[in-house]
Image (cartoon, helix red, strand yellow):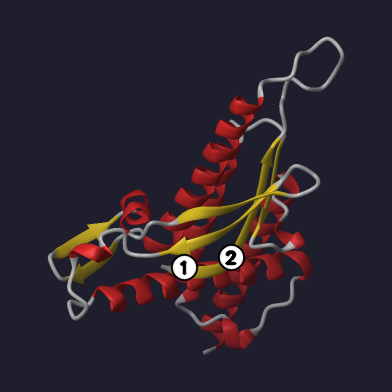
């Protein structure tokens, strides 16, 4: 299995554990919510990286949406326990779920490698968007025209993630082990602003050519 250096730190805060008149939910319920939250994030990342991707490897040939790709490539957090604050940290991994059913020379390894690269490209784009939203500085060399094609997709993806996370009251989520990716309403605002800034930048580049 190919391990990604993408750290997912997550925790669901018990929404009922906020005052003396409320009873906290049992640990089992909180663990279930933790798992659902991690799955929601993995689904989001898989869709961003792999939606509409056609794969051909051995006896596998399909156009994948993000949900099916997550199953095919076994994108899941690998739990490593809780820290002193009660938060879980996990590394994401990518591996071909049916690898044992294929022969070594049927192209599966190449497909897994491409899956790995596609996830990294999606994450790199998210960091590019975040940087533009934080300080407005845009690296011309990292913003070719074809990035503009993906920006609406990123914006829609972020909006869907924000809506999905609304069902986890009091969640704490840090993506990729980066404090700048502490996910809350302000983070989403920064990211969407970054999409707009890069779109404007690319449009200026187009008109100046």
Cα separation, mark 1 vs mark 2, equals: 10 Å
Can you say whether 111 is above or below 63 in the image?
Answer: below
Chain-order first, disc 1 or disc 2:
2
Residue 89 place in picture, x, y as percent: 65, 53
Viewer-proximal residue among 105 and 44: 105
Q: Dot 2: few (<14), some (14–19), or many (≥20) neighbours within 10 Å?
A: some
Q: Which residue is located at x 87 percent, y 13 percent?
A: 20
- How many marks overall? 2
Find numbered disc 2 in the image and state the secondary structure of the residue it sits on.
strand
Can you say whether 74 is above or below 199 in the image?
Answer: above
Q: Which residue is located at x 69 percent, y 70 percent?
A: 132
Q: Residue furthest left?
A: 59
Task: Mark 1 vs mark 2: give the one in front.
Answer: 2
Q: Residue furthest top?
A: 21
Q: Quadrant of the N terminus?
A: bottom left
Can you say whether 160 is above or below 96 in the image?
Answer: above
Residue 115 place in picture, x, y as percent: 38, 70
Asked if marks 1 and 2 touch (Cβ < 8 Å), the reply is: yes
Q: Which residue is located at x 42 percent, y 64 percent?
A: 94
Q: Which residue is mark 1?
A: 119
Q: Which residue is mark 2?
A: 6
């Amino acid at each position: 299995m190919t391990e990604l250096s993408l750290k997912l730190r997550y925790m669901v805060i018990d929404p009922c554990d906020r005052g003396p008149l409320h009873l906290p939910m049992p640990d089992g319920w909180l663990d279930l919510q933790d798992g659902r939250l991690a799955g929601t994030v993995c689904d989001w990342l898989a869709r961003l990286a792999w939606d509409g991707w056609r794969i051909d490897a051995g006896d596998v040939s399909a156009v994948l949406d993000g949900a099916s790709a997550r199953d095919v490539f076994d994108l899941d957090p690998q739990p490593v326990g809780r820290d002193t604050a009660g938060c879980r940290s996990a590394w994401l991994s990518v591996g071909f779920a049916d690898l044992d059913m294929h022969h070594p020379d049927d192209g599966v390894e190449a497909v897994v490698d491409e899956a790995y690269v596609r996830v990294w490209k999606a994450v790199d784009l998210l960091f590019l968007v975040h940087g533009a939203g934080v300080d407005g500085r845009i690296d011309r060399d990292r913003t070719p025209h074809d990035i503009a094609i993906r920006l609406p997709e990123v914006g829609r993806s972020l909006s869907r993630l924000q809506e999905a996370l609304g069902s986890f009251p009091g969640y704490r989520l840090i993506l990729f082990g980066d404090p700048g990716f502490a996910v809350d309403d302000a983070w989403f605002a920064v990211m969407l602003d970054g999409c707009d800034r890069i779109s404007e930048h690319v449009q200026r580049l187009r008109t100046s050519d």
